[in-house]
Image: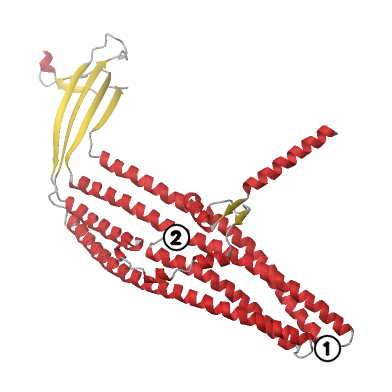
Amino acid sequence: MKNKLLIIFSLLSSFVMFSQENNQSFTLQEAIDYALEHNRTAKNAALDIEAAKKQKWETTATGLPQISAEVGYQNYLKQQISLIPAEFFGGNAGEFSEVIFGTKQSMTATATLTQKVFDGSYIVGLQSAKVFLEISKNAKVKTDLEIRKAVIEAYGNVLLAEESAAILEKNVTTLEKNLFEINKIYENGLEEEESVEQLKITLSGVQSNLKNINRLKDLAYQMLNITLGLDINNPTILADNLLELTSQNMDLGLLKTNVDIENTIDFKIAKNDKTSKELLLKLEKSKALPTLNTFINGGYSAFGNDFNFTNKDQKWFGSSLLGVNLNIPIFSSLGRSAATQRAKINLEKAKDDLIETEQKIQLQIASARSDYQYAIEDYDNKKQNLNLAERIEKKNQTKFFEGIASSFDLRQAQTQLYTAQQEFLQAMLDVINKKAVLETVLNSINN
């Protein structure tokens, strides 16, 4: 019996330790850092950079020496017959003799070295591979910025749900106490039934909101887990609270930051697009240039009517060839000209897009700054409103139990308080989110 208890205790201890290991606690910054490493989209963006590096070398390698080898075996199941004048062999003039040239079987082994000497498209390809790598790196920066913003929003939504649930639970407790007291007063005939019903209506509404916010809280945790790159049902713990994060994200200096539009990631991406269109135009133009390639090969051939190629006595005949190929485009029925004109049109579009992107970024920055400033101002306003609503509700509660205020007045004050509570929580979240949006647009991340 003692041994069984020890085994059970050991199993329970292991289960508790395993559960504790799965519980992961994150501050907001820790959550951001974790997501940038484990979020699936971030991981794929990093893999895109590695793929771009490989593609760059793949393009470079096409202009370096290429060696290939070929082994061929032929076996004529029925050899071709040729007819030649019989008089060559002492026959009658006008007659033909049937002759078979060559052996029934043959085998060749050849190795070839090729090298580009000049190819305009290869030069453009090297430049394009470099630009593609830069595009992949900029895409990774853009992805990281968006993931950072997504983590902040998801983290804030969880905190909002937690704070909302805590406030609603507190409100339910207060209402239940008030309802209990007013019931006693009503039973003693000192209060109207309407007062009891008014409190029941208020309590029922708050309880319904509490159930809903608890469901939303579960969804908020699941969304955060997905954003972090965790299992959707991972028991994640948040180390920060909403009020502290709001205070940390009050940064009026961010509203006055000087911005170089060309350093923003959206401008860089648009500039990459313009550069790629320039290279496509160069590629189309390069197709009108001649290409020059050289090659050298060497090989051996063996012949026989039987398969004796593996015998050491088999005779092999060597051969070698050096060659140069010059390909000169002459006439393409204006196909190349049309392709070049199309590339020019796409380049003009990319230039216009770059100008438009610059203007959009300026507008986005101005809008994000305005939204962030408003969020800070609204936070101060909602904080004052909450303090006033708390005082009004407290006064009305006192008046109600003293018989001075009606149940309708109390319910109105309570509803006003609950609205002020939720607006204050939302105002805190807006400060955090609006700052994240502004930092994303500015491409200015202060950890």
Residue mark closest to the camera, 1 vs 2 = 1
Is residue 300 or residue 404 the one in the foreground? 404
Q: Quadrant of the rendered structure where residue 357 is?
A: bottom left
**Relative to residue 208, is residue 306 depicted above or below?**
above
Q: Residues within 10 Å of mark 2 (few under 14, many from 20)?
A: some
Q: Earlier in the sequence, mark 1 or mark 2?
A: 2
Is mark 1 in CB contact (under 8 Å) with mark 2? no
Count of numbered labels shown in the rendering: 2
Instruction: Where is residue 276? Give x, y as percent.
Output: 27, 56
For residue 389, the mark is none
Q: Residue at x 71, y 69 (%)?
A: 169
Going by the numbered disc 1, the residue's amino acid type is: Glu
**Relative to residue 36, is residue 95 depicted above or below?**
above
Going by the numbered disc 2, the residue's amino acid type is: Glu
Residue that numbered label 1 is attached to: 192
Residue that numbered label 2 is attached to: 146
**Relative to residue 79, is residue 203 depicted above or below?**
below
Is residue 100 or residue 76 the one in the foreground? 76
For label 1, the SS is: loop
Q: Residue at x 86, y 80 (%)?
A: 184
Residue 344 horizontal side relative to residue 161, left or right: left
Q: Residues within 10 Å of mark 1 (few under 14, many from 20)?
A: some
- Work out whether residue 127 can be spotted: yes
- Work out whether residue 98 can be spotted: no
Residue that lies at the very extreme toward the bottom in this rendered image: 404
Q: Residue at x 23, y 20 (%)?
A: 300
The span from disc 1 to disc 2 (Cα, nearest Å) is: 57 Å
Q: Quadrant of the rendered structure where residue 96 is?
A: top left
Residue 239 horizontal side relative to residue 339, left or right: right
Instruction: Where is residue 110? Give x, y as percent.
Output: 24, 25
Q: Residue at x 16, y 27 (%)?
A: 321
